[in-house]
Image (tube, rainbow, N blue to C red):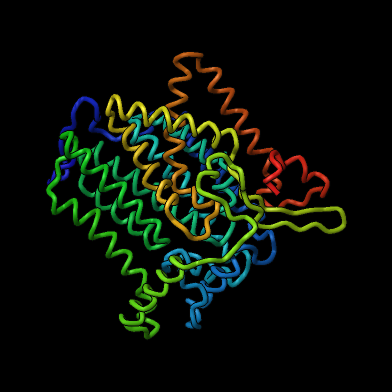
Amino acid sequence: MVTDRGSGVGDRNLAVSLSRPRDPQTIWLVVALLVAAAGLRLWRVDQPPAQYFDEIYYARTAQEYLTGAPIYEWTHPPLSKLLIAAGVRVFGLTPRGWRVAPALFGVLLIAALYLLGCWVFDNPRKGVLLAFVGTIEPFFLVESRIAKPEIFLVGFAVAAYAFWWAALRSGRLRWLYLAGLCAGGAAATKWTGAATTAVLVFATILAWRRGAMRVRPGHAAAALLLLPLVVYAASYAPHLARGETLGDVLRLHRNMYGYHSTLQATHPYTSAWWTWPLLLRPMWYHYEATGGTMTGVFAVGNPLLWWAAIPAIALVAWRGWTHRRLEDVFVAAGFGLTYLPYAVIGRLLFVYHMLPALPFAYLALLSLADAAAARTGLRWVTAYLVVAALVFVYYLPVLTAYPVPAHWLRWWIWIRSWV
């Protein structure tokens, strides 16, 4: 439970101590995953050598925040562009400059997934497995190598969920405030990041009702409602520093809402929300073929992980409904709150809008793996993860814009709609 003095005792189902790696093997596995993630994200990060896909908006706007020029991309909150601007300040307006911040956040995402797995399941080995699954997820790698908001959004959200579980497991109130801080970062990246706060509030109410978390409503409201609003408001401080007034910022928000609520544009890679878990329409962010050689950046999920996540979510939702375990209800509700709202959003949608729901899908996948291991033995689960890792390696050339013979393209197209 969480107490106002920062300590407490949980019930038998919720261990009070945080799951820290106590054996060298776990520590080295985590280090190896972080090193691998960093290498994959920073290796040839300057390729493609020019802006591609939405970088034409975000890299330019990051530079404009630094120079004081009029802001070009205003349809999303500023935080991702400010973080990209930090890299541009260090390395200049170069591919490395506008991609280094997403790359570093991609590494932090793997660390956050480790902590989330540790604290949801109260088991460091489960944390390693969740971090491993995140490492072999192609979409996370692609979004870590492009100047777009998605990797910041997912990174802040996963950190928020991990810190909330740390608060529940350890009984320390400060973790709850860290969760609210990160939830504010998610909302200050994209408005859809507000779903992070919704998940935390829902989980807190559920834990309250079960007696697993005891915290005064004032602390909960300050940590999970007020603090995210403060972080969101603070992200607009650079606008005020540029001489804009509060009235200008409010008008900007009206324009943002008008833009998203009336957007009628078309795009060849738009896709309906229900097609995303099936991977019916992934996206080519970049493709170029010259002289028989191609480079590509294919924003696609790992099919073995995404397709298995569908029965995994169904299993966890059923188990949460019948057994009411807090972990299962958290995963099922979190997935629903971050994914299902797109069923009623009428604007242009893309498969990358699925990314904030992926951590819940992968938590469910670990639960499914546990059930499968109990029935068929651990070796089959291990074999599945090994094959999923090989699929990730198989796709690496078209995740990192590595030059390959152009006729190889057909080997990466598993479904006709993937082109």
- Residue at image position (43%, 46%) is 339
Left or right: residue 246 compared with residue 132? left
Q: Nearer the viewer, residue 50 or 314?
A: 314
Please tell me whether residue 227 is drawn above or below residue 254 in the rendered image: above
* Quarter placement of the N terminus: top left
Viewer-nearest residue: 392 or 268: 268
In this rendering, is residue 75 above or below 278?
below
Lateral position of residue 174 relative to residue 389, left or right: left
Q: Residue farthest to the right?
A: 291
Give percent across and percent down for residue 65. Answer: 47, 76
- Residue 194 percent location from the top left of the image: 35, 56
Q: Position of residue 402 (x, y in %)?
A: 73, 51
Left or right of residue 323: residue 140: right
Q: Residue 39 appears at what percent x and percent y?
A: 60, 47
Tell me the quarter of the picture where residue 46 sits.
bottom right
Residue 61 lies, with reference to residue 114, above or below; the image says: below
Which residue is depicted at the point 53% across and 40% down?
277
